[in-house]
Image: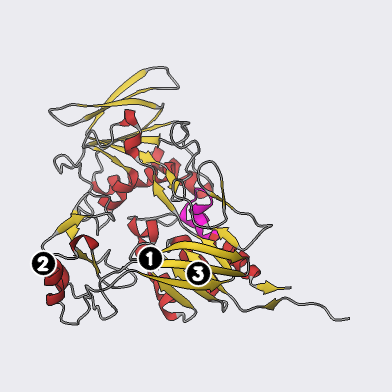
Amino acid sequence: MTEDKAAPVSGSILVVGGGISGLTTCLEAAEVGYEVFLVEKNPYLGGRVAQLNQYFPKLCPPSCGLEINFRRIKDNRKIRVFTLGEVEKVDGTLGNYDVTIKLSPRYVNENCTCCGDCEAACETEISSDFNFGMNKIKGAYLPFEMAFPARYVISSQIIGTDDAERCKEACKYDAVDLDMEAKTINLKVGAIVWATGWEPYDAAKIDNLGFGKYQNIITNMMVERLASPNGPTKGQILRPSDSKQPESIAFVQCAGSRDENHLTYCSYICCMASLKHVTYIRERYPDAKIYIFYIDIRTPGYRYEKFYKKIKEDKNVFFIKGKVAEVNENPDSKNITVVAENAVTGEKIKQEVEMVVLATGMQPTTKDVKLPADLKYNEEGFIINDFEKGGMFAAGCANKPADVVSSNQNATGMALKAIQTLVRR
């Protein structure tokens, strides 16, 4: 009697999303011999991690984790990367999917050496999406210093203008190709992993917290960019109205989270993100007063709890258990008064600070725009994994709110699930 053994069948894996979850899924599958197609809608890989100043558990800069992953992708012939790509259609069944992908033009080809001559020649400035609109960049730009692929992008906003022609004329390597057009490619794959990630909840929707109305109210992800050496202020955390070094800052936790009018769930990472931001401020302004308004402080795990206890020992950090009801601006100083009720004492608090940070939660990118595939979602827009059906899986924050460590662990599991789809028993 012979024993049936698992035997690999011909097939490839498609990973949609080039953030930390997508990178992990891609590498785990490719490094055991499977062909992987990686599709990312941005002109670069790295996702939200690329926008951080530091990330847990070791408070490393993004280069710490992304650089080695980019090198592994570059060196692996089993991986094909498509940036500026979006999935338009998925047909077929598990083990045999037909996928249509639209690729938008970069207007810069593989000849690019990142010399920067096109950027220098460009006169038009556009808003920086990477920095959440806090500064302007040239219409010809490198997304960030260690961007992968290491290639400039010509914004579609300047195509057809004299500026675009100046960029082309400035390039001595014939890398600027203004005739590039969008194109469609078709892939046949056996399994698909959706690592489509998350986006910060739109703080402007939270009427009582003043974002967009008062200049000195910003979000947690904006703090990450301000603190980053490659951010709009080159690592200085300055209040927007006058570029002053703030002497007092308030953090408003659960800004829109655990709220039936916005995000009904806890986003898992917000408390730890704010505690991390306290360390950013402490490094720069050791005497600044910091006020943290919270419903509950959630620090999952021994290491995070230890981090929280260390922050609590700082005599200039004040924790106030109470949901913020409103904020008001002093029109002369541009300072912000935060109004809340202390849930412990019942006292109404009015705390004036020079800057406010809203700890907004994470919303799946699939919340409002669903993917062109047969997938199930929960009421908040996260993809529900149907392991019994198989074939297509959601990894990382496409499935649930998670930090980098949890996302990596989950992505490794989804790589295995995808591989199992390609194995005939």
The amino acid type found where label 2 is placed reads Asp
Q: From the image, tell me which residue sits under label 1.
A: 45
**Residue 190, magenta (yes or no):** no
Viewer-proximal residue among 63 and 38? 38
Q: Secondary structure at mark 3?
A: helix
Q: In the displayed orientation, state which residue is furthest to the right.
A: 1
Work out whether 282 lies above or below 164. above
Which image quarter holds the N terminus? bottom right
Q: CA distance from mark 3 to mark 2?
A: 40 Å
Specify the segment rendered in magenta. Answer: 396-410
Give amino acid for label 1.
Leu
- Closer to the camera in the image, 50 or 189: 189
Q: Is residue 249 above or below residue 302?
A: above
Please state which amino acid type lies under the numbered disc 3.
Cys
Q: Report the mark closest to the observer, 3 or 2.
A: 2
Mark closest to the chain's N terminus, 3 or 2: 3
